[in-house]
Image: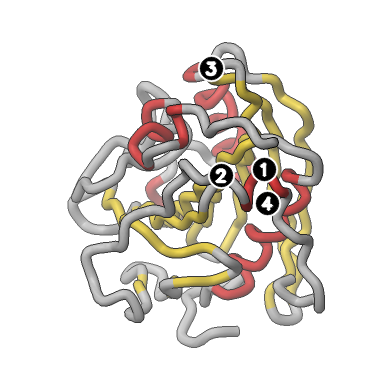
Amino acid sequence: MTSPLPRSLRALGAAAALGLLAPACASTAARPDAPAAGHRTPDQAGGNAAPAAPREITRLESAKPPPAAPRPAAEVFVHRDSGFSFPSEVAELRRGDITNFDDQGLDVGIGYGRPGLNVTCFVFPRRTMAEPTVDAHFDGALAAIRTNNPDAVLVDRLTHPVQKGEATVAARLALLELREEDERLGSILLVVPAGDHVIKLRATYLMAAGATSYVLSRLDALLDAVSWAPTGRASAHL
């Protein structure tokens, strides 16, 4: 018997309240994991068989997928500054709201989700980072998440290899656990260097046996489906 989904995951906006995901339905907003000051902008599939979703994720009747973005469902969203493109649906995840964190559309959050799992994919140029390196940005984002969620437990932080075409990119990964209304929530931060840009994934999900492995497989599949280039501007799917 599964537990009812906590109120924090019954609606997309609640994840933003936890400081985990981009606020929904906003043209511009402050990035939820941005430091309070000092940031100039608001902050395989490969494989034959992806892990099956844990029962607690697949059978959350009260969970709702994210609302459709205000554009035709089949349309691919292209981040203008990088050329990276994001499909409307991939790896059992449906694209939701797209949020700009500045007036130029350089710093963007693209929401994806399915019942029991919410993901936001942030894309922004390195030149807009206050931090000197991607590693330093990862450290700052992780510190901000833990500040916004004082009860968060850091389970692990490590290097996560991301395969793109013939290149392997060393991404930075943090796994955390949170508690909300006596429910255990998993939280993932994954920061991927992408040439002159950075892709940052934030995932929040209900903890269950096998849930973290399943969510990581969905994030890898999402990165595989998105058209991005490890060494520069994307012009086509690699």
Quarter of the rendering occupied by the C terminus: bottom right
For the residues labelled 1 and 3, say whether their Cβ atoms are less than 8 Å apart.
no
Alpha carbons under labels 1 and 3: distance apart: 16 Å
Alpha carbons under labels 2 and 3: distance apart: 16 Å
Is tag 4's residue or tag 2's residue first in the polypeptide sequence? 2
For disc 1, the marked residue is: 56
What residue is at 63 percent from the left and 40 percent from the top? Answer: 188
For the residues labelled 2 and 1, say whether their Cβ atoms are less than 8 Å apart.
yes
Name the amino acid type tagged 4: Val
Describe the element under mark 1 as helix, strand or loop: helix
Is tag 1's residue or tag 3's residue first in the polypeptide sequence? 1
Task: Please identify the residue farthest to the top as the structure is shown.
Answer: 150
Describe the element under mark 4 as helix, strand or loop: helix
> Can residue 84 be seen here?
no
Alpha carbons under labels 1 and 4: distance apart: 13 Å
Is tag 3's residue or tag 4's residue first in the polypeptide sequence? 3
Describe the element under mark 2 as helix, strand or loop: loop
Is tag 2's residue or tag 3's residue first in the polypeptide sequence? 2
**Residue 60: image tag:** 2
Tell me how the rendering is colored.
secondary structure
Q: Residues within 10 Å of mark 3 (few under 14, many from 20)?
A: few
Name the amino acid type tagged 2: Leu
Quarter of the rendering occupied by the N terminus: top right
Alpha carbons under labels 3 and 4: distance apart: 22 Å
Seen from the viewer's position, the closer of residues 11 and 149 is 11
For disc 4, the marked residue is: 215
